[in-house]
Image (cartoon, rainbow, N blue to C red):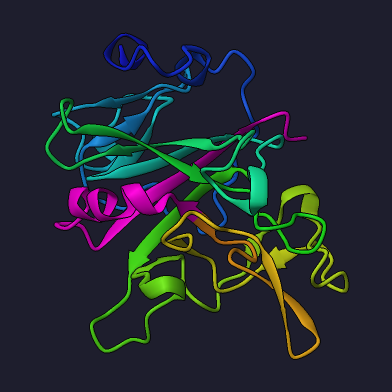
Amino acid sequence: MLAEKYPSVSPYTYTYANPIRFIDPTGMEGEAWDDWVLGANGAIYWDDNATSQETTKPGDIYLGKAVVVFYGSTEERLGENQNLYGKDAKLAIVVVYGPKGYDDVHVFRGYTMSSNPKLFGVVKSGIYTVNRLKPNERKGPYGSEWVVESRSARIPAMNDYNPAHPERNPGYLTGVFIHRSNNNGWAGTFEKNGRVHGVSEGCLLITPRDRKTFNEKLKEINKFKLIIRRENEE
């Protein structure tokens, strides 16, 4: 069990005692990659026999060759000086389920709640597909190659509301990437040209200390399933 493999991580994270409502906006859960599966009980496991939804056990969801899960909370917050490493920071746990099987599982730290959720949208808990940008495509924030669905995709906002675009009903975000914060861990807001900007205006963050290894574990992958799970999300 992952709770035994990573004793420093709360067992709650892997038992899902308070399951979160999932969505799959693209309906791509049956795409034939291989081999990670989401069990009906909420646990993710490696199945050598699962290479498509059709070969997956009834009631389970075929995920594919690699999966990244952000186990977060609506109570996530930046620490002192708006820094991921600052005092009193509360971060998400990020687990990469890699393409080499059960032992290819790695734990990182990240952040899901944007630089300021009162100003910017937050991605809704759910299941998404993350794609690597093509070599000739413009990189995302901080050089990221990982875009959730696509730059133009409408990614559902938490509580169906995006404060940066209150006219959207239900709320959604576009241009959502997985990227690092500033190299020193700063992930806050700043003003430019009369507008408040954020290191994350809805993107998912990996701590800069983890970014290189995170990308290394996914170097053989051009797309993967992303699962966001937050405690306390309505």
Residue 147 pos. (x, y %): 43, 67
The magenta region covers 205-234
Instruction: State left or right for residue 72 relative to residue 179.
Output: right
* Residue 218 among magenta residues: yes
Instruction: State left or right for residue 82 relative to residue 71.
Output: right
Residue 186 pos. (x, y %): 55, 58
Residue at 57%, 35% in the rendered image = 72
Nearer the observer, 227 or 87: 87
Query: Number of marks in the image?
Result: 0
Quadrant location of the C terminus in the rendered image: top right
Nearer the observer, 106 or 99: 106
Residue 78 pos. (x, y %): 64, 45
Residue at 37%, 86% in the rendered image = 138
- The answer to whether residue 27 is visible is no
Residue 188 pos. (x, y %): 64, 60
Instruction: State left or right for residue 88 relative to residue 149.
Output: right
Residue at 74%, 63% in the rendered image = 120
- The answer to whether residue 62 is visible is yes
Residue at 26%, 45% in the rendered image = 66
The residue at the far right in this view is: 167
In the picture shown, does residue 96 fall above or below 156?
Answer: above
Which of the 4 quarters of the picture holds residue 55?
top left
Which of the 4 quarters of the picture holds residue 5?
top left
Quadrant location of the N terminus in the rendered image: top left
In the picture shown, does residue 102 fall above or below 51?
Answer: above
